Each structure stands twice: as C-alpha cells, then as structure tokens.
Image (cartoon, rainbow, N blue to C red):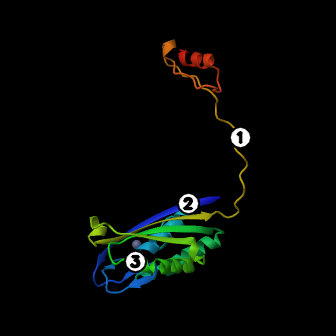
Amino acid sequence: MLRIGEGSDIHPLAFGHPLVIGGFVIADAKGARGHSDADCLTHAVIDALLGAAGLGDIGHHFPDDDDQWKGARSLDLLSMVGEKLHGLGFTIDNIDATVFLQAPNIKPIKSTIAQNIAEALGIQPFQVNIKAKTGEGIGPIGKLEAIEAHAVCLIEEPGSVELPPQKESRPRSISISLPMEEDSAPPQPPGGANPPEDSANDLTAT
Ligand SMILES: [Zn+2]
C-alpha cells in the first residue's frame, strides 16, 4: 500500500548563522537560526517521511532540548530516518518539496540539493524534486525574516498486497420521513436505478 506524508518547517533568519538548505551551505547570506544546523528543507523532508511511516515527527526523534543534536548536520539526521524506514521495510517512491526564501535565489543549486537529499536516503536524484518560491516581498518570507519549506512524499508499506475488490455494499435506496406534497417530489433521473413510483413512496412515507 502506498502511504503519503507531509512535512513543513520554518526558521528565523539572522546574520551570523549559516544558511543551510538541503545540506548546501550558502555563504554571505542571512542564515537560519535553530538547534541543529537549521536546515529547514531537510527538516520538512524528515517530517514527511516520518509522517508517511506513522512514526511521529522530528521533535520526537531529535528533541531540540537534547544536546546530542545541538549543531547536528540535518542530512545525517535524514540518513538516520531513511535507514529507520528501510529497516522497517518501507521503500521511498518520491519526494516533492518547496523552499520559500526571498533571497538568495536558489535556482542554481536546486539540482545539487536534490542530489544531496537523494544521496542521504540512498535513492536516485530523479525521485527528489525541489521547487523554489519567494515571498513576493511580503510577510516574514518576503521581508527576509524567515525561511520556510514544505515537503510531501510517497512511500510503500512493507509486504504490500493487492487488495481484493470491495463488495458492493452501498444501499441502492433509502427511506426518509419527510412530509412532502406528491407534486413536490424531486424529478427522478432518466434511467435511474429505482422506478419513480418507488422513490415517490419512499419520500412521502411518514
Ligand atoms: Zn527545523
């Protein structure tokens, strides 16, 4: 069975911090503040994968009050999550993510970022898609106060089997007790499953 997961993350931007996006370090930019390397995109991908596997969220696995993860390289955390899913028998089909950042323009590094994430997870770069958007100059993204990322993924559950076709159990008609004039009964669709007189009786039953 396919399972979908989604994740999102936001970090404040400030000078004096590195700006790390999908493991790529951008110098001379307002950086992201956080407990680890504040790699917003990678955190969103981690949450998407954990969510798809039903394993909670990043805060559960890597608490931000645990010194073990202080300054951690988020791609390493992503690798650990990938290994966890792999160990449980899950396979990753694809990841699609969007980075919201006013500046700098990350278009030239999108493919490198995708490769970094794919490599950390042991999948192929074509299974990872990275999109980039600005904040159009408004809000915390547009005013360079924050970086945000959203991610979705599809994974396959271990031991996936073809489910048998569902039996037709949907009732073909119901009786409802609404006092209605006979001539106000709704028109029946042509060729409907029920003869019009039966439906009229149902609708006028008290
Ligand atoms: Zn984060």
Name the mark nearer the viewer: 1 or 3. 3
Q: Amino acid at mark 2?
A: Ile
Q: Which residue is mark 1?
A: 167
Residue 63 seen anywhere in this rendered image of the structure = no
Q: Which residue is mark 3?
A: 106
The Cα–Cα distance between marks 1 and 3, rounded to whole angstroms, is: 51 Å
Q: Amino acid at mark 1?
A: Lys
Q: Is residue 186 placed above or below 91 in the rendered structure?
A: above
Tag 1 near tag 2, CB within 8 Å: no
Which quadrant is the N terminus positioned in?
A: bottom right
The Cα–Cα distance between marks 1 and 2, rounded to whole angstroms, is: 25 Å
Which residue is rendered at x = 60% and y = 65% of the image? 155
x%, y% of residue 52?
55, 63
In the image shown, does 42 or 138 lie closer to the viewer? 138
In the image shown, does 87 or 38 lie closer to the viewer? 38
Name the mark nearer the viewer: 3 or 2. 3
x%, y% of residue 46?
50, 71
Which residue is rendered at x = 64% and y = 63% of the image? 157
Exactly how many numbered labels are in the figure? 3
Q: Tag 1's secondary structure?
A: loop
Which residue is rendered at x = 51% and y = 21% of the image? 186
Which residue is rendered at x = 29% and y = 68% of the image? 142
Q: Is mark 1 within 8 Å of ligand 1?
A: no
Q: Amino acid at mark 3?
A: Ile
In the image shown, does 187 or 36 lie closer to the viewer? 187
Q: Extreme bottom residue here?
A: 27
Q: Does label 1 or label 3 sit earlier along the sequence?
A: 3
Quarter of image, res 64:
bottom left
Q: Does label 1 or label 2 sit earlier along the sequence?
A: 2
In what quadrant does ligand 1 lie?
bottom left
